[in-house]
Image (spheres, helix red, strand yellow):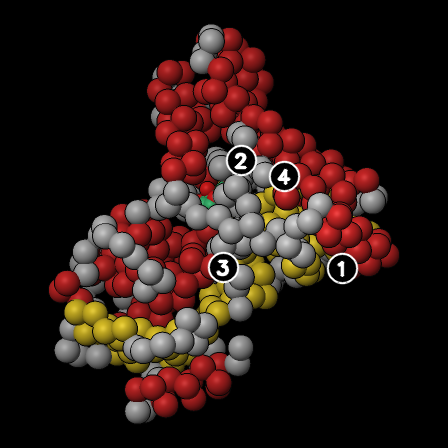
Amino acid sequence: MGAQQVADRFAELYGAGPEGVWAAPGRVNLIGEHTDYNDGFVMPFALPHQVVAAVSRRTDGVLRLHSADIGGDITELRLDDLAPGGDHDWTAYPAGVVWALREAGHEITGADVHLASTVPTGAGLSSSAALEVVIALALNDLYDLGLKGWRLARLCQRAENVYVGAPTGIMDQTASACCEAGHALFLDTRDLSQQQIPFDLAAQGLRLLVVDTQVKHAHSGGEYGKRRAGCEKGAALLGVDALRDIPYDGLDAALARLGDEEEVVRLVRHVVTENERVERTVALLRSGDPRAIGPVLTEGHASLRDDFRISCPELDLVVDTALVGGALGARMTGGGFGGSAIVLAEAADVETLTKSVEEAFAAAGLTAPRVFEAVPSAGARRLV
Ligand code: GAF
C-alpha cells in the first residue's frame, strides 16, 4: 500500500491532504513465546506487511477515523468521551492510543486519520500492535511528544491492556516500533534493553516461511489471560517477582517445590526453558550457524503444544508436515490458539514444502493456508 495512495484517499475523505504519512509493521516472533509478561526474553522481527496511516491534527477535541480495509463511514469520537471498557471494534486500538497518550499527560487536541493495512488480521502477526504503533508515532511526531522506541511501545501496550482489555505483554508493540531491516530484535522485556541481531537468511541460502493457518484467534478471549494468571501464580508460589527469576539450572528444584500443582508446573517449565531457547538462538546466530536454530524452534513448538497447551491441530499439522518434508525447524508463532506457524528451510526446499503443507491441509478438509516468505523488515517510521 503506497503512501501516496493513502494520502490521496485521506484528501478525498477529509477535503485536504494529510500533514504526514506513517507506517508500522506486523511482526513474526522467531522464538520467545509467552515470555514477555514473565519479564523474559523474546526475539521478533518485523514483516514487510504494515499499517500505513495518513494523519492531520485537529483543534476541536475530535478524533475521526477511517480504514480502507473496513470501509464504510468515518467514525467520529470526542476525545473527552474516550473511556476503557465496553464493546469495541477496530477503532478501539487507535482510540485507545489517544486515550493512553492523554492519560499520560500529553496534550492531544484531535486528529483525522485514514488507514490501510497489509498485515493479515487474527493471524498472530500483530496487526493490532501495528495499528497502535502507527497512530502513536504519527501523534508523537505531529504533537512533538518526544516519545521513542519502548516508551512509545509502553503507551500502546497500555491502550491494549486497559482500553481494549487484552492482557498482552510488551513484545508486539516494541517489535513494531523498534525492529530494523535485516535483523531480529533480542529484547529483554524486564529492562527493555535491546540488541539488533543480524538475521539475513537469504544470504545463507535459507528461507523462513510463515504459514497462516487461517484459524483466527483473539487475545481478549479467556485462554491467554488464564495462561498469564497461571504464570503469575507460579511466580508467587516460588517467591519470585516473575518467572524470569528462575534460572534454567534451577528449574528442577523449582518444579519440585511446586509439588502437585500440575498445571503450574507445565507453565513454569515452558517459560524457563523458552528463555533458555532464546539465549541459545542468539548464541547460534552470533556464531554464524543459522541452520542450527532449526531444532531449537522445533523444541519450542513441543513446549508450547505439550506444556503451555496453546497449539491447535492446524498448527501441529504445519509443523509435522514441514518436518517430515525436510524443514530444518518449525513452530507456532505468536499468542497461539490459531494464527501462524513458521518454517525454517533450505531455499531449495521451499516449493516442495509449501506444496506438501497445502496438500496436507486439503487432505484434512481444512481451509487452504496462506504461505509467504518472511523477510526481516524495517520498524515504524514516517514515510512522508
Ligand atoms: C501475543 C501478545 F500480544 C504478546 O505480548 C506475547 O505474549 C505473545 O502473544 C506470545 O508470545 O502476541
Q: Residues within 10 Å of mark 2 (few under 14, many from 20)?
A: some
Circle on res. 202 = 1
- Kindly report the distance in space between the C-alpha atoms of the residues bearing marks 4 and 1: 30 Å
Q: Mark 4: which secondary structure?
A: helix
Residue depicted at 60% across the width and 32% down the height: 305
Residue 141 percent coordinates (x, y): 33, 72
Circle on res. 310 = 2
Three-letter amino acid code at disc 4? Pro
Which of the two discs, 1 and 2, sits closer to the camera? Answer: 2
- Residue 302 occupies quadrant: top right
- Kindly report the distance in space between the C-alpha atoms of the residues bearing marks 4 and 2: 10 Å
Residue depicted at 45% across the width and 39% down the height: 36
Which of the two discs, 4 and 2, sits closer to the camera? Answer: 4
Which of the two discs, 3 and 1, sits closer to the camera? Answer: 3
Circle on res. 121 = 3
In the rendered structure, the answer to whether residue 300 lies left or right of residue 161 reads right
Q: Mark 2: which secondary structure?
A: loop
Q: Mark 3: which secondary structure?
A: loop
Three-letter amino acid code at disc 1? Ala
Residue 32 percent coordinates (x, y): 55, 39
Q: Residues within 10 Å of mark 3 (few under 14, many from 20)?
A: some
Circle on res. 313 = 4
Asked if residue 328 shows in the view, the reply is no
Mark 1 Cβ and ligand 1 under 8 Å apart? no
